[in-house]
Structures are given as structure tokens and as C-alpha cells.
Image (spheres, helix red, strand yellow):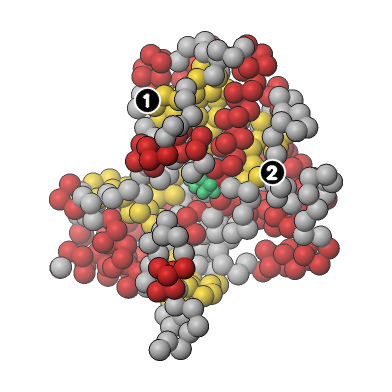
Amino acid sequence: MSEFSEVRSDFDEYIIPTYSPAPFIPVRGVGSTIFDQQGKEYIDFAGGIAVNALGHGHPAIKETLIAQSDKLCHMGNGYTNEPVLALAKKLVKHTFADKVFFCNSGAEANEAALKLARKYALDNYGSQKNEVIAFKSAFHGRTLFTVTAGGQPKYSQDFAPLPSGISHVEFNDLTAVANVINDNTCAVIVEPIQGEGGVIPASVAFLTGLRALCDKHNAMLIFDEVQTGVGRTGFLYAYMQYGVVPDVLSTAKALGGGFPIGGILTTDKFAGTFSPGTHGTTYGGNPLATAVAGTVFSIIADPLFLAEVTKKHDYYIQALNRLNTDYGLFKVIRSAGLLIGCELADEHQGNAKTITNLAAEEGLIALIAGPNVIRFAPALNISQAEMDLGLHRFEAAIKRYLEA
Ligand SMILES: *Cc1c(COP(=O)(O)O)cnc(C)c1O
């Protein structure tokens, strides 16, 4: 008999097994430190998969939740509300966008972006302009349209028939895009830095070239910034670092700091394609979600906050390079701000999960991005002490892995 009324084995008994969660159950966190049911403490380098940008238990998020839930949690989109308007104004003020649509997740944001592209092309050029170009190893979410746009057939093939008109080309290969793009292309969807695909940054030339090809063929350029957005790279959005402006940008994950919210940003040129009734979602833009996102966004949009992200990035990279000098575990370390991917050297391929499991035993929560990449996406405000302790535990896990 366990002393807890909910235990890990309940997952296997009661939850549809789309995941295979860790053996322990986290119950509370403060900053980037987590505690499980047994009271064991972990340093969190995963940040809820790039979601908990302000860590756990952030007082401003808590205060916003309490204050807004005291006023109004949900009304439905027959009414607008103050928090959604305030958040939209902030996003427009700080980005290329003129207008915003809110939903509840990254997949829904990309779904909205792709639907916008199809309808814009239909309205302006005719039904033959419906083709979408996407990239191998890309990840855009799990709805049928977005999982088909994603570049990992193993995630989509069992759900056929799939939406048609989507082709996949090699990421960072502009010639490959030039060979398939044509006047029937309605959109190109791309992650400026492939996250799930292994933390692989696009080259500046690639994104610049995509912009030019889209302009030439009147195709919408969609940046999926669900993982790279809201300060993750040390810039508010990654497109700012590249100096390439998309037509539509999807955002989610860190935007709510843990509260589910997503959205797309676009310009007036495209926004009018959606009129009342053409697209929607019950929860999208609800006052509770947008109040929290407004608080999170204001904290992260501060240039001083973003500068700290870059400093923390430099610290991580120095420390990881040092570890690699000592242990030679990685082939390459790729990074953009606090999105960091350590690709295992050839003789260690396939062992990323083994190493993150050992890390958890040592008291460090880390992510993988495919079988060969250990990924860190910690809270953007992780403390120096937490970084040091987490890196120390990472080293302990590496030692154990190499000694095994
Ligand atoms: C996580 C992610 C998504 C999907 O977001 P959900 O909120 O899980 O639907 C889409 N695109 C990218 C780049 C992501 O990292």
C-alpha cells in the first residue's frame, strides 16, 4: 500500500497511453526546482518543454490568476474582454503584426495559420493555389493537418487518409524548395529553429531565400515559433534575430508560462481573410488565459530580461563545452538562447533517453529531441545556483553513463 492516493501505476490503469511518463510524480515547484511525491528535489532544465518560461510558482502569474479568476474566467467569443484586448495590443506593439487570433495550443495556432493560407489563396487566386511546402523533421503539432505538415511520417501515417497538397523538402536546402515551389503554392511553413527535430537552426540565407521565393510566388511564409517564441532565443521572437519577417507567425508554449494559450500573428493584408464564422474556438482568447499571458509577455518583452537570457545561454555553452572536453560525449552542441541541443557522438547514438533517465536519478530533469539529442529548454529566469547544480548533476549522470 502506498501512502499516496494517486500513484504512477494509476497512469497505466486510467490514462490512454499516449505518453510514457517518468516513474516519479512531481507535485510542486518553485523557480527551476521541482519536488516529487517523496520529497526528492530536481533541477528543471526542461521547463515543461519550453513552456515554463518564468519557472514554477512565479508570484506574478499567481497574482494574475487569482485577480482575474476573481473577476471573469470565461465568457465565450460572443463578447470580447479586457485581458484579450490588452494582450493583443502588446503583441502588435512588439512585433511585425497588425492583428492576432488566439487559440489554446501550438497545434491549433498552426492549424489556423494553414487554414488562413488556404483561404487567402482561394479568395485571391483560386482553388488551384492550395499547395503547402513543409520540411523534413519539422514538428507542427498533432491535429491531422499539422501532423501531416510535420516532417516525421511515423506520426501521421497511421491516420490516413491525410490532408493532401503538402510536400516535404530538406530543411536548410533552398534549392530543394526552389525546385518544388510554384504559383500553386499557398504557403511555406517552417520553424526558424527546428525544436523537436533536434535543435537545428535555419541558416540566415535559408530563411532569407524562403522569403524571396514566397514573395515571387505569392505564397504565405509561416514561421512556427511555438517553441522559439517569447524570449526563448534571447530575442522576443526568433525572426527578429534573423531579420526575416514572416506573413504569419504561430506562438504558444511560453506565451502562457504554463497556462494553455496559443495564437497567430499576422498583418492586415491577411487578417481580413477570416471573417466572423470562418474560424474559431470556444476557449480562444478567454480572459483567464490572456490575463496570464499578458503578465508573462510583459515580463519577458523587457530588453533587460532578454539580455539575461543571452548571458545564461553563454554560461550554459561554456559549461557544456567544458564537459565535452572532459568526456567527449557530444558531436556538436547547437543552441539559440536557452534552447540547447547536445548531439551525441557517433559511438553514443541512440542513448539520449538513457542519459536523461540517469539525469533524473541524479536530480535533473532534461529533454531529448530524437534519440541522439539531449535538449535543454529551462525557464528563462533560471538562477545561477540552479544552473550550476543542474550542470553538476548532468556531469554525474554522464559519468555514470560512461562507466556503465
Ligand atoms: C510544441 C510545438 C508545437 C505543438 O504545440 P502544442 O501546444 O503541443 O499543440 C508546434 N510546433 C512547434 C515548433 C512546437 O515545438
In the rendered image, residue 18, in percent from the top left (x then y), is placed at 42, 56
What is the x, y in percent for residue 377? 45, 55
Q: Is mark 1 within 8 Å of ligand 1?
A: no
Q: Could you tell me which residue is drawn at 42 percent across and 39 percent down?
A: 159
Whether residue 292 appears in this view of the structure is: yes
Local crowd at mark 1 within 10 Å, few (<14), some, or many (≥20)?
A: some
The residue at which mark 1 appears reads as 169
| Callout 1 amino acid | Val
Which SS class for mark 2? loop
Residue 150 lies, with reference to residue 252, above or below; the image says: above
Left or right of residue 320: residue 279? right
In what quadrant of the picture does the C terminus appear? bottom left
Label total for image: 2
Which quadrant of the structure image shows residue 389? bottom left
Q: Nearer the viewer, residue 250 or 104?
A: 104
Name the residue beneath numbered marker 2.
281
